[in-house]
Image (cartoon, rainbow, N blue to C red):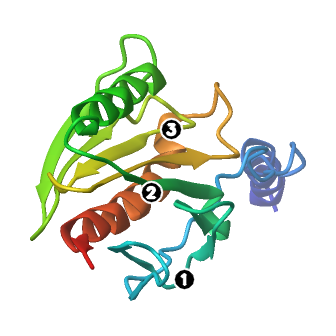
C-alpha cells in the first residue's frame, strides 16, 4: 500500500519529464525541392548548319535563325545557344567577343572552372562558375573554319540570395549534357 503513492509520484514525474503535453513537433518551415535527373538520352537537332546533340527530355525552340533554346522545364533552366557563321577575317573577333561576355557574366570575384573540350571538328571552352546563380555555365566552340557555337545556361528561378548548393544538382545535370553536346559537336 505504501508503494502505491510512490509509484504514482514516479509515474507523474516521468510523464512530466517525457515532454508529452509540450509543443508537438512540427515539420521544417522551409523545404528543399527534390530535383530529378532528366536522363541521358540524346537526339540530334535538325536544320542547323552544325551537328548538335541535346538531351531528348529537353524542349527545343528556335526563336530566330541560328539561335536555339534548350529548355529543361523541371530544372527551370534554359541553354541559350547561338550558331554564328564566321570568316577567317572575323573569327578571332567573334570568339574574343563571346569570351569577354562570358567573363562579364561571372559574379565579381567568383571562382570559375575552365574546361577545354574537343570533338572531331571543334575546340570548346566551357566555364563553370557556381556562384553565378543565374548563369553558372557558359561555353564557346570554334571549328577553325566557318562556325562559332556559343551559349549560356540561364536558371530562371535562381534568386540572388538562394543557396548555391540547392542549384548544384541542376547545374550538374545540365553540365553533363553540355559536355556531351560539346564532345559530339561536328560540321555537317
Residue 34 in view (yes/no): no
Q: Earlier in the sequence, mark 2 or mark 1?
A: 1
Q: List x then y, in percent, for residue 111.
A: 29, 23
Q: Quick one: quadrant of the N terminus?
A: bottom right
Disc 2 from disc 1: Cα separation: 16 Å
Q: List x then y, in percent, for residue 137.
A: 40, 44
Residue 50 in the image: above or below residue 128: below
Disc 2 from disc 3: Cα separation: 15 Å
Q: Residues within 10 Å of mark 2 (few under 14, many from 20)?
A: some
Residue 52 in the image: above or below residue 145: below
- SS type, badge 3: loop
Badge 2 is on which residue?
Answer: 169
Frontmost of labels 2 and 1 is 1
Q: List x then y, in percent, for residue 93.
A: 29, 29
Q: List x then y, in percent, for residue 130.
A: 40, 36
Badge 3 is on which residue?
Answer: 135
Residue at 64% x, 40% y is 158
Q: Earlier in the sequence, mark 3 or mark 1?
A: 1
Q: Residues within 10 Å of mark 1 (few under 14, many from 20)?
A: some
Residue 174 in view (yes/no): yes
Residue at 45% x, 74% y is 48
Residue 141 in the image: above or below residue 75: above
Q: Looking at the rendering, which quadrant does residue 163 occupy?
A: top right
Q: Is residue 74 left or right of residue 119?
A: right
Q: Is residue 103 left or right of residue 87?
A: right
Q: Nearer the viewer, residue 35 or 82?
A: 82
Residue at 69% x, 61% y is 63
Give yes or no for contact between labels 2 and 1 (Cβ–Cβ under 8 Å).
no
- SS type, badge 1: loop
Q: Nearer the viewer, residue 102 or 86?
A: 86
Residue 57 badge: 1
Amino acid at each position: 500500500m505504501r508503494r502505491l503513492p510512490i509509484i504514482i509520484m514516479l509515474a507523474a514525474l516521468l510523464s512530466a519529464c517525457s515532454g508529452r503535453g509540450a509543443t508537438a513537433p512540427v515539420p521544417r518551415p522551409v523545404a528543399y525541392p527534390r530535383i530529378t535527373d532528366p536522363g541521358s538520352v540524346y537526339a540530334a537537332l535538325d536544320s542547323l548548319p552544325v551537328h548538335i546533340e541535346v538531351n531528348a527530355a529537353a524542349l527545343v525552340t528556335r526563336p530566330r535563325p541560328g539561335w536555339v533554346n534548350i529548355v529543361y522545364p523541371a530544372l527551370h533552366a534554359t541553354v541559350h545557344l547561338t550558331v554564328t557563321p564566321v570568316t577567317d577575317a572575323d573569327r578571332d573577333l567573334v570568339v574574343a567577343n563571346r569570351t569577354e561576355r562570358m567573363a562579364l557574366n561571372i559574379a565579381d570575384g567568383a571562382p570559375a572552372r575552365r574546361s577545354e573540350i574537343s570533338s572531331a571538328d571543334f575546340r570548346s571552352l566551357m566555364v563553370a562558375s557556381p556562384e553565378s546563380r543565374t548563369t553558372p555555365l557558359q561555353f564557346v566552340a570554334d571549328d577553325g573554319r566557318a562556325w562559332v557555337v556559343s551559349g549560356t545556361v540561364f536558371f530562371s528561378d535562381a534568386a540572388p540570395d538562394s543557396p548555391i548548393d540547392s542549384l548544384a544538382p541542376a547545374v550538374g545535370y545540365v553540365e553533363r549534357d553540355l559536355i556531351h553536346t560539346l564532345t559530339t559537336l561536328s560540321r555537317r
